[in-house]
Image: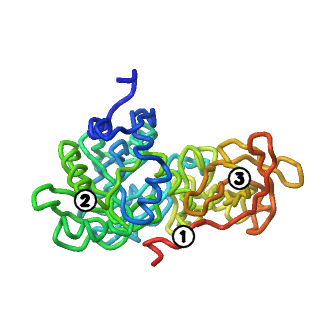
Amino acid sequence: MTEGLSRTPLYEEHLALGARMVPFAGFEMPVQYAGIIDEHRAVRSSAGIFDVCHMAEFRVFGFEAFDALQRIVSNDLHKIDEMGKAVYTVMCDETGGIIDDLIVYHTGDLEYLIIANASNRAVDAAWIAAHLPEEVEFVDESDRTGLIAFQGPEAVRIITELTGEEPPARFRIAEARLDGSIPVLLARTGYTGEDGVEILCATSDAPAVWKLLLSYPEIAPCGLGARDTLRLEMGYPLHGTDMDRSIDPISAGLSWVVSLKKGEFIGSDVLAKIKEAGPERRLVGLTVSEGVPRHGYPVLHEGVEVGTVASGTFSPTLEHGIATAYIPSALAEPGTCLEIVVRRKTVSAVVTRPPFVTATSLSA
């Protein structure tokens, strides 16, 4: 085992499939199997599965759980008053900086499930627990929870066949049994822009779920590489790359998850001022004429550096480079012409409003 790295319950499955393993968020994770482009296209055309067991899962429950979480996250949890609903949100510090982006699920009368980024597990757990009253219970369930993302135009058909019923509607979660025997939670959420589900199960059941899904020839195992190209084609931000504690959600293009009308929450006073004045810099999408933009590459306007690439890749669907970058708000209008320095060559780039790819099973 690589020193200091953890393994998910699917580690042996990845080795058996010949995956190339890399360090990621403190884990040994598969970056690819057959190849990033093949895996990417399998998800866009059929279905793919991803090991996301490294993600963090927290339970918060108690009579004051709702009010406490309302003060911790930026979005309005009244949107998920109905049990089984989910909402995407961010969690900010007192300066408005993004500690993490989260999905919060309403899973019980007085209970909420939070899924967070693996690299932020310890920080998130400490922050949430420190801002909960004594009457509210907090449990870190990450070590005993397996999580497999199942995405693609064939995913809903197959999961329906495996459970005997339609999965929950978008941004909802429900109990189910796979193949009549494996108890799971199905969340109709994802990070690829395709329809599908994220399957939560006991860690001991994760290998059985993985093997069951791979018994379908339509389903391809997919690694971190394809997950990144798929999410960037949709313009989905990645914490640690597109946002961090130095960035506020208004500047990050996430003002739609900031509910200032719901009342005070941590960082709300700062965010209100930024929204009123307008951010100095904004995260924008960039369509690149040639080459592959990468994180940290300089972004120029009329020969002057105005920012750096946050996320960048080659889009297998569009067959050219795409990127995100923070640039001055005055240059953030779609259609603005910029340049990126790619391997000592300056190439043209155009500000583009994400998603870069619009035709997916979610848009059909």
Say whether disc 2 or disc 1 marks the residue closer to the N-terminus.
Answer: 2
What quarter of the picture does the N terminus occupy?
Answer: top left
- Classify mark 2: helix, strand or loop: loop
Position of 55 compared to 180: left or right?
Answer: right
- Classify mark 1: helix, strand or loop: helix
- Amino acid beneath label 2: Tyr
Q: How far apart in space, not on screen, are marks 2 and 1 (Cα)? A: 47 Å
Q: How crowded is mark 3: few (under 14 residues within 10 Å), some or many (20 or more)?
A: many
Residue at the location (62% across, 49% down)?
311
Residue at the location (69% across, 52% down)?
325
Residue at the location (20% across, 57% down)?
184
Q: Residue 154 placed where, x, y %?
A: 33, 68
Q: Is residue 360 above or below residue 114?
A: below
Check disc 1 and report the residue beneath it: 261
Check disc 2 and report the residue beneath it: 216
Image quarter of residue 215:
bottom left
Name, please, the residue furthest toward the left: 181
Mark 3 or mark 1, whichever is nearer to me:
3
What quarter of the picture does the C terminus occupy?
Answer: bottom left
Residue at the location (45% across, 39% down)?
119
Say whether disc 3 or disc 1 marks the residue closer to the N-terminus.
Answer: 1
Q: How far apart in space, not on screen, are marks 3 and 1 (Cα)? A: 27 Å
Q: In this view, does 273 lie above or below 148?
A: below
- Classify mark 3: helix, strand or loop: strand
Q: Is residue 40 above or below residue 15?
A: below
Say whether disc 2 or disc 3 marks the residue closer to the N-terminus.
Answer: 2
Image quarter of residue 318:
bottom right
Position of 269 compared to 86: left or right?
Answer: right
Check disc 3 and report the residue beneath it: 326
